[in-house]
Image (cartoon, rainbow, N blue to C red):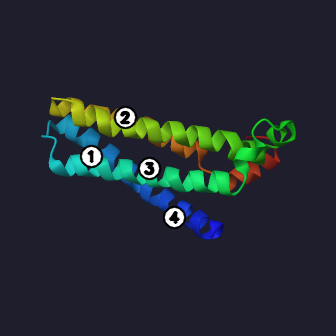
Amino acid sequence: MMTGIQYLHGFLRWVVLVLLLLSIVKAFSGMSAGRNFSKGDMKRGLFTMISLHIQLVLGFILYFGKGWSSMLGNADAMANTVMRFFSLEHMATMLIAVILGTLGHSLSKRASDDRIKFKRQAIWFTVSLVLILSSIPWPFRAGFEAYGWW
């Protein structure tokens, strides 16, 4: 079962990245063009936030189900870059990214001016995307770790 959840978590990563990129591009273009913030813009932000939350729930299932949480505070695990990445760095960074992505949707929903709505989405979703990209376990990262570059 954990393998299936891990594959789903890996697949949903691409959905999250596409939605974030699409939301960011639309937010910047809407802000610069002076468009009205439409229901479609609100729904895109909502779907982006929902995908982030589903990804987080799947990540928590993997985090506790695979035992990564039990390695926190273990000096030997923290000395190993892979174990430290999955038990601490990946989870903490992704949790912060989801919180910031949620802020992007929530703050834009509460704003009264359309330009401010686009601006809030653009800023918070961009920060969230940067954090996510920095903490995805990309395949090339293993090569950098082998040489001590990461």
Location of the C terminus (image quadrant): top right
Residue neighbourhood size for the residue with mark 3, other residues' Cα within 10 Å, grouped as few (<14), some (14–19), many (≥20):
many
Residues at discs 1 and 3 in contact (Cβ within 8 Å): no
- Give x and y (percent) for residue 22: 33, 51
Query: Taking 6 as reference, is 96 left or right?
Result: left
Query: Taking 124 as reference, is 86 left or right?
Result: right
Q: Which residue is mark 2?
A: 103
In the rendered image, the residue lying farthest to the right is 76
Q: Which residue is mark 3?
A: 52
Q: Which residue is mark 1?
A: 26
Residue plotted at (69% across, 50% down): 141
Distance (Cα) linking label 1 and label 2: 17 Å
Q: Which mark is residue 97?
A: none
Residue plotted at (82% across, 38% down): 74
Query: Taking 101 as reference, is 11 left or right?
Result: right
Q: Is residue 41 above or below residue 9?
A: above
Residue plotted at (30% across, 36% down): 106
In the rendered image, the residue lying farthest to the left is 36
Identity, as a three-letter code, of the amino acid under mark 4: Phe
Residues at discs 4 and 1 in contact (Cβ within 8 Å): no
Q: Which residue is mark 4?
A: 11
Identity, as a three-letter code, of the amino acid under mark 1: Lys
Identity, as a three-letter code, of the amino acid under mark 2: Leu
